[in-house]
Amino acid sequence: MKKNSYLALLTGTALTLALYGCDVDQTQEGKMPDVDVDVTEGQLPEYDVDTPDVDVEMEKEVIEVPDVDVEMEEEVIEVPDVDVDMPKDD
């Protein structure tokens, strides 16, 4: 993997831990505000939308493409070692 691939992997791991590594407890109930609404007035807007007519078909085409041979080799790199302590359940 290249350096950018490791950075993407580290970023994805950090985001996953940020989303799933939290213990959230509700400490207070919410309350909706009191609202008076006159439902006899008002109207939703109307739209007349003309969309293009698109026809998609598949056809065969002969093109030149490069013939690439790739040799793999092992390389020692530094990777992050992450240790996560999850919050304790109350």
Image (spheres, grey):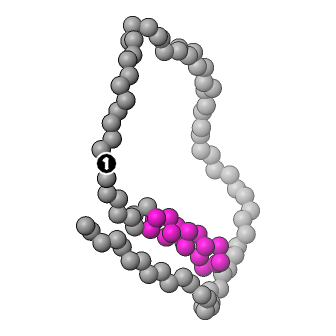
Residue 55 rendering spot, x and y as whole percentages: 60, 33
Q: Is residue 64 above or below residue 86?
A: above
User: Which quadrant of the rendered structure holds the C terminus?
Assistant: bottom left
Quadrant for residue 38, please give it: top left
Other residues around mark 1 within 10 Å, as few (<14) / some (14–19) / many (≥20): few
Quadrant for residue 76, please give it: bottom right
Q: Nearer the viewer, residue 70 or 6?
A: 6
Q: Is residue 8 magenta?
A: yes
Q: Is residue 84 above or below residue 38?
A: below
Kindly give the residue lying farthest to the front in the view shown: 28
Q: Is residue 58 above or below residue 33?
A: below
Q: Is residue 26 above or below residue 75?
A: above
User: Residue at horizontal 66%, vertical 81%?
Assistant: 70
* Residue picked out by circle 1: 28
Q: Nearer the viewer, residue 64 or 53?
A: 53
Q: Main secondary structure of the magenta part?
A: helix
Residue 5 rendering spot, x and y as whole percentages: 61, 73
User: Which quadrant of the rendered structure holds the N terminus?
Assistant: bottom right
Q: Nearer the viewer, residue 81 or 72?
A: 81
User: Residue at horizontal 49%, vertical 70%?
Assistant: 13
Q: Amino acid at mark 1?
A: Gln
Q: Nearer the viewer, residue 60 or 36?
A: 36
Q: Is residue 85 magenta?
A: no
Residue 67 rendering spot, x and y as whole percentages: 70, 73
**In screen coordinates, is 2 left or right of 12?**
right
What's the magenta region?
1-18
Residue 80 rendering spot, x and y as whole percentages: 54, 82
* SS assignment at label 1: loop
